[in-house]
């Protein structure tokens, strides 16, 4: 339940940020096309620009498009900059919560029963490691989402990369569930305490 909550929060954060940024990538492409058009007009008609003394007008036209592109890209990159610290914070907070709850579970075992305390502690460490694997696969998916831009990759390639990352995350979750199958007692304590 703890890991599922953190995973759900991370996925919601990813969907919101990507939902805001991806439509702006199309705008970036249009703005880049506009800057290329202005530069091509300026280069093709350089003699006319010089003849009519229109350098200031052409520079202002280019500067306007360039600044609009710059502000759009700055917004996109700043929005993407929230993803990695958010995932890192979630991973560290999840580890902290697991070990905090685990400490109360270990403290509930009588001090005289050293073997049971050691078994509970090892179960907590294993569960923390598996939860970290799940969060790391989400972190990998975030990095994959940040790499391509729509100018460099078609949406189909980007979707294939996302599906690959999702399948990797699913494989990690299955691995965690299979490994935790033997630790049913620990999971019941952790989830239903």
Image (cartoon, rainbow, N blue to C red):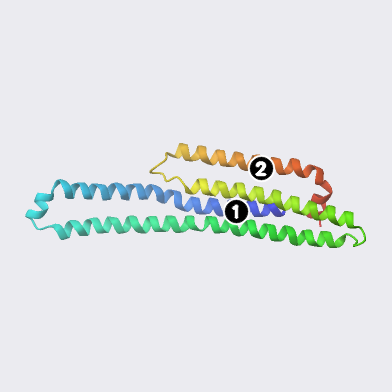
Residue 192 visible to an observer of this rendering: no
- Residue at (21% x, 60% y) in the render: 60
N-terminal-most mark, 2 or 1: 1
The residue carrying mark 2 is 172
- The alpha-carbon separation of the residues under discs 2 and 1 comes to 16 Å
| Nearer to us in this view, 144 or 126 | 126
Front of the two marks 2 and 1:
2
79 vs 37: above or below = below
Q: Residue at x 91, y 61 (%)?
A: 110
Residue 167 located left or right of residue 47: right
Q: Where does the image place residue 80, in percent across and percent down from the top left?
A: 48, 55
Q: Secondary structure at mark 1?
A: helix
Query: Measured along the vertical axis of the image, is residue 144 above or below residue 156?
Result: below
In this orientation, which residue lies closer to the viewer: 192 or 133? 133
The answer to whether 106 appears left or right of 88 in the picture is right
Instruction: Report which residue position mark 1 lands on.
Output: 10
Numbered mark located on residue 103 in the image: none
User: Among all residues in the image, which is located at the extreme right?
Assistant: 112
């Amino acid at each position: 339940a703890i890991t599922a909550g953190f995973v759900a929060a991370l996925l919601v954060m990813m969907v919101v940020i990507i939902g805001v940024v991806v439509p702006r990538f199309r705008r970036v492409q249009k703005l880049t096309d506009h800057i290329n058009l202005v530069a091509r007009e300026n280069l093709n008609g350089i003699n006319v620009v010089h003849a009519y003394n229109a350098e200031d007008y052409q520079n202002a036209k280019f500067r306007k498009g360039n600044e609009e592109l710059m502000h759009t890209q700055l917004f996109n990159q700043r929005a993407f900059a929230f993803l990695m610290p958010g995932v890192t914070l979630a991973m560290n907070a999840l580890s902290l919560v697991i070990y905090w709850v685990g400490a109360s579970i270990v403290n509930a075992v009588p001090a005289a029963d050293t073997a049971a305390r050691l078994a509970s502690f090892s179960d907590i460490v294993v569960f923390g490691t598996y939860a970290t694997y799940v969060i790391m696969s989400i972190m990998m998916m975030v990095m994959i989402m940040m790499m391509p831009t729509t100018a460099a990759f078609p949406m189909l390639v980007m979707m294939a990369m996302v599906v690959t990352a999702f399948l990797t995350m699913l494989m990690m979750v299955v691995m965690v569930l299979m490994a935790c199958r033997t630790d049913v007692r620990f999971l019941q304590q952790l989830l239903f305490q």
